[in-house]
Amino acid sequence: MNKAHIILILLIFSFFTQKTEAQNPKELSTSDITNSVFEKGLKFTELDFYAGTLMLHGMSEFSLLKGNDSLQNQVIGLYKKFSTGEIKAKGSLYSYEAGGSGAAFLAWKGVTNQLDAQVTTAAEKMLKLQKRSPEGLMTANFAKDDQIFIDVAFAITPFYLYTGLKSGNQEYLNVAVNQTLELFKILKDKKTGLLHQARGFNGVGSISEDNWSRGNGWGAFAIACLVRDLPESHPKRNEVVAVAQQFFTSAVRLQNKEGLWHQEMTDKSSYVETSGSGLILYGLGIMLEKNLLDAKYLDNFKLGLRGFTSYIGSDGSVSHTCFSCLAPNKGTKSDYKLRPWVYNDHHAFGPVVLVFAQAAKMSIDKITPLRQLGLYSIADKPNMVRCQLVYARGSDVAWENDRMSYRVYGPTVRQKVGNGIDVWAKKVNYSIMDKWFKLNSEGKDYHQDRGEGCDFYNMGKLRGCGAIAVWIDGKPYPSETFDSYKFLKNQMDGIGVQINYQSWNVPGIKLEEKKIIEMNLGTNIFKVTSTLKSDTDRELVVAIGITTYGKPEVIQNTQNSSLAVWENIHAEHGCLGTAVLVNPANFAGYAKYNGDEYILVKVKTNVPFVYYAGCGWDKSKYFKTNSDWFKYVNKEAKKVKFIDNTSIYK
C-alpha cells in the first residue's frame, strides 16, 4: 500500500468519524446543567420575587447531594438575607417572606437551624392574615370575590408541608393537603384530566378555558412535593396519590416528540413552553422515584431531559419561557396561546434547576441531547437571524431585528444622556448586540466598524430616533432616562418591551410615560404605544423627535403625517435615514428645537397613542440613496396601523 492510499484511508476515516460525532452529540452532566442554569438565573431572576424562590427551592434539593456542601452554605446564606431584611420579599403570599418553600425544606431536613425562626414566623402570619376564598382556601391578597388560581399552590402546599413536618404541626399538614386537593378539584378539566389556571377573573364562578403549561406546572410541583413527602399515616394520603397518578398520566399523553409540552398543552401549534415543561417533568421524576407510576414512564422522563437541552444554552441561558400570565383577556385557549415567550425570563430558571436536580437525585448523571445543546440559544447560535431584547451594562435596554438595532438608557447614566432612542447601524442580518456589548466590556470600542457595523450615532440629551417630549409654548419638555423596564416578548420573530419613564419635569402637570415598543423581522421601523399617565385627564401636544447633525435633508409630508430625514452624519460611516410616522387623526404640525426635528401630535393623558419610528443606513443592502429611504418611508406610511394591540401583554 503506497503513501497516497494511506492518506486517502485516513481522510475517509476522519470524515466518517466527524460525521458520527456530529450525529451523536456529546453526553452532558445533569449536575453541570443545574449549576450553569443556577448561575445564569442569579443574574436574571430577582430573589425577592416568587420565581427566585422557586429557583432557590430547586437548589435546596440539589444541595443535599454528596459534594454540594459549599453550594448548600451559599443557599442557606441567601435564605438568611430574607430574615435580616437584606432581601425584602415582594408578592402577595406571606411564605415569600421566609424565602419560600425551599427554606422550609432545608429546615425540615435538619441541615441547619438558622432558618427555623423565619419559616415559623411566616407560617403563623400566613395562617392568620392570608386572604381566603369563599371555600376558605388561601389565595393572593389582591384577589377579589371568588378569585383563585393554581399558581398559589406552589407557594402554599410545599411550604406548609415542610413547616408541618419540621414542627410536627398537624394543622399545617392539613392546610397543605386540603389546599391542593381543593384546587385540583375546582380547576380540573374533566375532558383532559389537566388543570385550568384560574377562577373568577372573568366574572364570579368563571373558569379559564386553558390547559396552560406553567399553570399545570405549578400544580405538578405542589402535588409532587406532597406525594413524595406526606407521611404514609396521613388519612388523605391515598387520595393525594390517586390525584397525582391521574394528573401525570394525563399530562404524559400530551408530551411532544421532544418530551416537552406546549404553551397551550392541547394545541401543538402553540410554542414549546419550557417553564411548565420543567415543572411537569420534575413531578414526573418524583412519581417515578417513589414508584407511583409504571416504570415505562421513565422513557418519557429521559426524553424530556434530552429534548430540554435544545432550549438551554451552554452559558446556562433558557429560551421559550412564557411571560407573566394570569387569566389573560377572556382566558380562552387562544388568549393563552398568544401570550409571548421571553428569552431568559425570570420564570425560566427555577423549573430547569428543579428537573435536572431531580434527574441527578435519580442517579441520571449523564444525558445525550436529543438534538443539540443550545439549539435555540443566542449564546450558541450567535449568527442566527432573529429579533432580540437585551439588558446590558446595568443601564441599557436594547432591541434589534435582522436590519437595525436600537437602545434606550436607564437611571445609572442619567447625567450623560436623556430619554433619546439610540441607533446601532448594522450591515448583517444576524444578531450583533451580545457580541458588541461583550466587545465593549473587554475594552474594544463598539464605535469602530469591524465589518458588521457600529455605533456612530451620538444624540446625548436629545431625542435620537423617535423619543418624545411634551410641547409647551414652543419648547420641548422631555423626561429623563427610563426608570424601569419589563420584557414582554423576546421571540425570534418579534420583541416587545415596556419602558417606564417616571422622572419628568413638565410645567403645571405631573406625568409618567409607559412606552411599549414592538418590532418584528423584515422592517426598519418599530412600533411605539405610549401612554402619558397623570392624575388629571387633559389634552397635550407631544413632540416626537429626530436628532440631526447640521446638514439634514428633511421631508415633512403632511399627506401621510410623516417626518423623514437623510443626513451624512459621519465622514467614515456614511449616511443615515431616520423617520417618524404618526396617526393623521392626531397630527398637529412640525417644529424644530436645538438640533432636533419634531413632528407634533395631539394626545390625551391616560389614553394610549401609537406612532412608528426607525432608521436606515446607506451601508446596508436596503438603502443607498436618500431617494431609497424616502420611498421606503412613504411605502411604510401606507401599511402601518395606529391601533393599540398591547392588551395581549395584560
Image (cartoon, grey):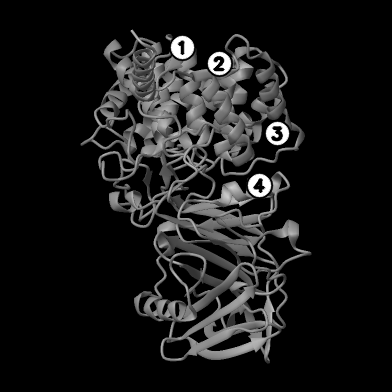
Disc 1 target residue: 231
Q: Quadrant of residue 69?
A: top right
Kindly indicate whether the residue at mark 1 contacts the one at mark 4 (C-beta within 8 angstroms): no
Kindly indicate whether the residue at mark 1 contacts the one at mark 2 (C-beta within 8 angstroms): yes
Figure check: 55 above or below 89:
above
Whether residue 236 is visible here, answered yes or no, is: no
Q: Identify the amino acid type marked 3.
A: Phe
Label 1 neighbour load within 10 Å: few <14, some 14-19, many 20+: some
Disc 4 target residue: 439
Q: Toward the viewer: 30 or 357?
A: 30
Q: Measuring from the top left, give residue 258's x and y in whole percent.
A: 32, 30
Whether residue 322 is visible here, answered yes or no, is: yes
First along the sequence among labels 2 and 1: 2
Q: Is residue 428 left or right of residue 87?
A: left
Residue at the image point whose x is 48% and y is 37% from the top: 152
Disc 3 target residue: 82
